[in-house]
Amino acid sequence: MIVSCAITGSIHTPSMSPYLPVTPAQIAASAIEAAEAGAAIVHLHARDPQSGRPTQDPAIYRQFLPVIANGCDAVINVTTGGSPVLSLEQRLEPARVFEPEIASLNMGSMNFGMYEMLGRFKSFDHAWERPYLEGSDDLVFRNTFRDIEQILRQCGASGTRFEIECYDIGHLYTAAHFLDRGLLHGPLFIQSAFGIRGGIGTHPEDVQMMKRTADRLFGEDYVWSVLSTGRTQMPVATLAMASGGNVRVGLEDSLWDGPGQLATSNAQQVRRMRTIIEALSCDVATPAEAREMLRLKGRAATRI
């Protein structure tokens, strides 16, 4: 089973936990620790060290990507999302500059509501965070068909493959559309995302429906993984893993380690997931095994 770890928060998690890595040094250390705990892939966003805002500035990425590459063998996965308030050109810049083995890619535009977090969190580290959450009832993350095509053409030209993030059933059909057009190539790495207000829910039937649909559309030519947000992270990951899937955990998707208990690191969540996987007599994939499963080009072919 491939375990991937979403190291630092983007639009999902404003700085509502003291354990969320923000500076380049913190991000690098957290990624290496997660890899040592068993993560074969580390999924990375960047933040401005002063304001805490999500940023896609390659200069910030350059401060932690080489450190991670020198410190572990994990597959480095760079986002093309980052923030809905950034332009497509800004969002694409790190993947264009560093040509990573994998880049994440959302399969559509969607409402992205995080305003319900205000019921739990009352204090924030940065002035922008509360109004950002308050305004998320009017927030759309944009990725049109044209946007997706541009990302596929520009990043795919260097051999970068994609973590295809599917927040609803229609996103699977969009992936199938680009597969038919020859802009995506198997095996697809389908990351089914559950629990975002605006996307599919977290009921076991939702999880199985995503898998059944992907099975029908892609047959044997895809690798299925799941992520779920908040308190449903571990239950949904366990359900999917027991159904033959792979899993993504990390502080981007959930700040929690248990009811009312903040996770103290990304590695803590990886270790918890690894314990579940091994208790069910399954194996955790190494980075080399993940590269083979996903047919990645290898670290040497990147510009990290």
Image: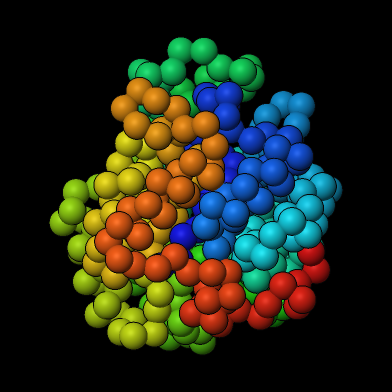
From the viewer's side, name the closer residue of 2 and 24: 2
Q: Residue 89: tell me if it is visible.
A: no
Image x and y of residue 125, in percent? 61, 18
Count of numbered tags: 0
Give the residue at the far top of this rendering: 122
In the rendered image, the quadrant that contains the C terminus is bottom right
Q: Residue 262: tell me if it is visible.
A: yes
Image x and y of residue 163, in percent? 51, 66
From the viewer's side, name the closer residue of 192 and 112: 192
In the rendered image, the quadrant that contains the N terminus is bottom left
Image x and y of residue 77, in percent? 61, 61
For the point 20% across and 64% down, the residue is 209
| 249 with respect to 161 (left or right) | left
| 261 with respect to 148 (left or right) | left
Residue 117, quarter of picture: top left
From the viewer's side, name the closer residue of 166 and 259: 259
Q: Is residue 194 above or below residue 12?
A: below
For the point 46% across and 12% down, the residue is 122
Image x and y of residue 177, in percent? 41, 78
Q: Is residue 182 above or below residue 152?
A: below
| 53 with respect to 269 (left or right) | right
For the point 52% across and 19% down, the residue is 130
Colour treatment of the image:
rainbow
For the point 24% across and 56% down, the residue is 239
